[in-house]
Amino acid sequence: MTLNTDAILHPKLQHVGLLTGDLQRLFQWYQTVLGMRLVSASPNPTAAPEGSPAAAIRAAFLSNDEISHRLAVIEVPGLIRDPQRSHHLRIQHIAFEVNSLDDLLGTYVRLKRGGIVPVFSVDEGPQTAFYYEDPDGNSVELNVNNYTDRWAALDHMQTSEAFARKPLGMDLDPDKLVAAREAGASPWEIHVRAWQEEFLPGRAFDPANVL
């Protein structure tokens, strides 16, 4: 057998690991927002001796598709939200893609009924994205490709002057997008109108408070 020790491989992102102080609360949020199901859970994943600090650690593995787990969640008692999180180095967000603008908007309406609303929403050019915060303050993006294929979205990022000028996108009010779609506007028309600043929110998004 000869191993490839020269060429760079391109492994696919498989799952994200999260640390939490409240596993059940986090699981319920991801179940509601992303349809995550519990694949496996362990009350003592390290098999630590009973009574030791490590024995209080719990683990759960969640997925919303055919992959064994998309989220690995580890509960460590005593962990709390960091009020200075925005000032620390960290993973800024994780993203999940839906199949259509209608799916994105329908999910927005469903979650809003339960009191879950985006922290901010943007048309980024190649995609439209709504950013939510989970109970621990992790940023979770739901997005949809604005084009009919992925290559067109890639081309947009490489050739669009508008994207080069403002790659973080055009701020959106999701309710205005819902109203436009219900009035008969096509997804592409909504994308074009977004960049004409038709769907701006009432209050400008301040990235310093979130990013």
Image: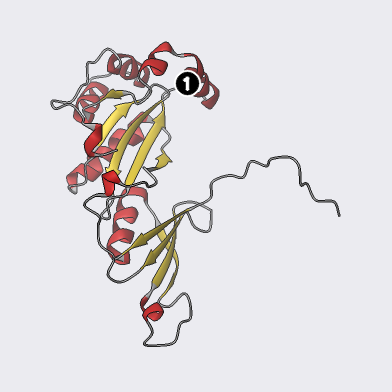
Residue lying farthest left? 202
Determine whether 93 is above or below 70 in the image: above
The amino acid type, in three-letter code, at marker 1 is: Met
Relative image position of residue 76 (x, y in whole percent): 34, 69
Determine whether 57 is above or below 150 in the image: below
Q: How many marks?
A: 1
Relative image position of residue 200 (x, y in whole percent): 20, 22
Determine whether 211 is above or below 114 in the image: above
What quarter of the picture does the N terminus occupy? bottom right
Q: On the image, which quarter does residue 174 sit in?
A: top left
Is any atom of residue 183 visible in this view? yes
Give the residue displayed 31% in from the left and 19% down from the top. 190
Q: On the image, which quarter does residue 192 sit in?
A: top left
Could you say which is closer to the camera, residue 33 or residue 134? 134
Is any atom of residue 185 visible in this view? no
151 horizontally vs 118: left or right: right
171 horizontally vs 147: left or right: left
Residue lying farthest bottom? 50
Residue matched to label 1 = 157
